[in-house]
Image: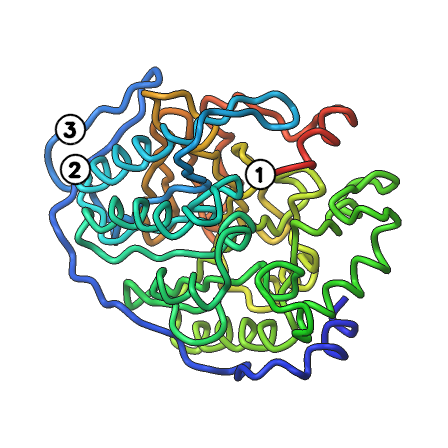
């Protein structure tokens, strides 16, 4: 797809090698040991040996001040209760003394009445503000159903006309946040080159008149749907340069984005359009240890042949009221330890140079393998 993206992306005005939007150097704080036992979270006293830093994670809050609904598969969606789930997550992060938080897209739901989108967004951001620490955001499809990209960037603290950036919370680490809806029919004016490029890709790759319908395609080929997207040539060049710069300074990298980039983590329609190019760039660089994403509404995990871990996070939206779906990630010199609370699964991810694949998901309640009927239903509205 890269050749196609490169041909049609020349109208974009952003610089492919622009610097990171922001960079935080966060000093260490006292931390707590967290262990998992029989589904319970225990917090012994004392510092955690070798911990470099800790950050909070959450995805697909999709808040709306409307009555509860269901997905096409019949899964309940708790629009109002998702705000309470976020509130508890921020409180949990504060208790665990995270140094920053990351939310992986879809802060508000597409069913928000359009005259209520700003109010819904502000309600969610008010909860994050109570952390009193940096929170990094990425844009999902439901965000773009509500508000234009430039307004979302402004509200989420993403500077400039593009929605991808990097930051470094520790001298040994760089986080690269990709914009999965760079090439997309969402969020751009109809005549924008990236909108037109996305339309051309869907016309070529999706045989259906309704481009949200993946029927007639199999596996990863089902990813070419209108609620998906890809990264353009300029962003891809920027991405490669970010990985190269990190390698030159001996930094490990965690890649974050709303759409998953590995087909072993989710159903076909949830994948980034040009995930193969992103994976190739990751493998070529050799310093990416993990990718983390949302969108699929189920926990998912794969470790590829190069030892890179790929993790998809469960959705707050489909978590029963009163239950939790968030976590934090402890970063060590030789592994990542994801501590999931409630409906978010925990996982330990050793780095490839430390040997051995990651641990299986704990409390795995959903399988990536689904019947064709279930997959078709899931794909209608992720």
* Quarter of the image where the N terminus is located: bottom right
Dot 3 lies on which element? Answer: loop
- Residue located 44% across and 49% down the image: 115
Q: Closer to the camera, 12 or 178?
A: 12
Nearer the viewer's eye, disc 1 or disc 3?
A: 1
Say which of marks 1 and 2 sits in front. Answer: 1
Residue 175 position, x and y percent, is: 40, 62
Q: Are marks 3 and 2 in contact (CB under 8 Å)?
A: no
In this figure, which residue is indicated by the disc labeled 2? Answer: 95
| Picture quadrant where residue 123 is located | top left
Q: Earlier in the sequence, mark 1 or mark 2?
A: 2
| 315 up-or-down from 99: above or below | above
The figure's colour scheme reads rainbow
Badge 3: how crowded within 10 Å, few (<14), some, or many (20+)? few
User: What residue did someone put label 3 on?
Assistant: 44
For the residues marked 1 and 2, what is the alpha-carbon distance in whole angstroms?
28 Å
The answer to whether 26 is drawn above or below residue 299 in the figure is below
> Against 210, is 82 above or below?
above
| Chain-order first, disc 1 or disc 3 | 3
Q: Nearer the viewer, residue 171 or 196?
A: 196
For mark 1, give the secondary structure.
loop
Q: Which residue is mark 1?
A: 296
For discs 3 and 2, the disc positioned in front in the rendered view: 2
Q: Is residue 364 left or right of residue 283?
A: left
The residue lying furthest to the front in this view is 115
Q: Tell me which label, 3 or 2, sits earlier in the chain.
A: 3
Residue at 69 percent across and 28 percent down: it is 369
The image position of residue 60, as x and y in percent, is 46, 41
Secondary structure, mark 2, is helix
Query: Are the residues at dot 1 and dot 2 in contact (C-beta closer than 8 Å)?
Result: no
Cα distance, mark 1 to mark 3? 34 Å
Label 1, residues with CA under 10 Å away: few <14, some 14-19, many ≥20: many
């Amino acid at each position: 797809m890269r050749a196609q993206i490169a041909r049609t992306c020349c109208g974009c005005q952003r610089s492919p090698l622009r610097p990171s939007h922001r960079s935080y150097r966060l000093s260490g704080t006292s931390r707590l040991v967290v262990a998992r036992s029989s589904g319970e979270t225990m917090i012994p006293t004392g510092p955690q040996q070798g911990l470099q830093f800790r950050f909070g994670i959450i995805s697909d809050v999709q808040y709306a001040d409307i009555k509860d609904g269901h997905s096409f598969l019949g899964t309940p969606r708790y629009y109002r209760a998702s705000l309470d789930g976020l509130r508890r997550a921020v409180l949990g992060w504060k208790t665990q003394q995270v140094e920053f938080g990351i939310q992986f897209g879809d802060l508000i739901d597409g069913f928000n009445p359009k005259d209520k989108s700003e109010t819904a967004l502000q309600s969610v951001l008010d909860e994050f503000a109570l952390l009193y620490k940096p929170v990094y955001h990425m844009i999902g499809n439901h965000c773009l159903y509500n508000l234009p990209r430039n307004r979302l960037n402004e509200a989420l603290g993403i500077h400039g006309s593009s929605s991808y950036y990097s930051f470094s919370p520790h001298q040994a680490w760089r986080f690269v946040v990709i914009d999965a809806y760079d090439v997309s029919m969402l969020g751009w004016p109809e005549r924008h080159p990236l909108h037109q490029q996305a339309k051309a890709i869907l016309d070529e790759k999706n045989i259906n008149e309704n481009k949200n319908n993946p029927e007639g395609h199999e596996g990863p080929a089902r990813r070419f749907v209108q609620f998906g997207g890809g990264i353009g040539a300029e962003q891809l060049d920027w991405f490669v340069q970010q990985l190269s710069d990190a390698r030159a300074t001996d930094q490990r990298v965690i890649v974050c984005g709303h759409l998953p980039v590995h087909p072993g983590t989710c159903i076909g329609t949830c994948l980034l359009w040009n995930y193969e190019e992103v994976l190739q760039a990751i493998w070529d660089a050799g310093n990416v240890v993990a990718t983390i994403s949302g969108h699929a509404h189920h926990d998912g995990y794969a470790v590829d042949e190069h030892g890179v871990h790929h993790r998809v996070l469960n959705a707050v939206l489909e978590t029963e009221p009163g239950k939790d779906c968030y976590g934090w990630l402890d970063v060590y010199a030789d592994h990542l330890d994801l501590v999931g609370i409630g409906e978010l699964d925990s996982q330990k991810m050793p780095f490839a140079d430390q040997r051995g694949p990651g641990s299986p998901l704990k409390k795995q309640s959903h399988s990536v393998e689904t019947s064709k009927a279930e997959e078709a239903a899931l794909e209608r509205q992720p």
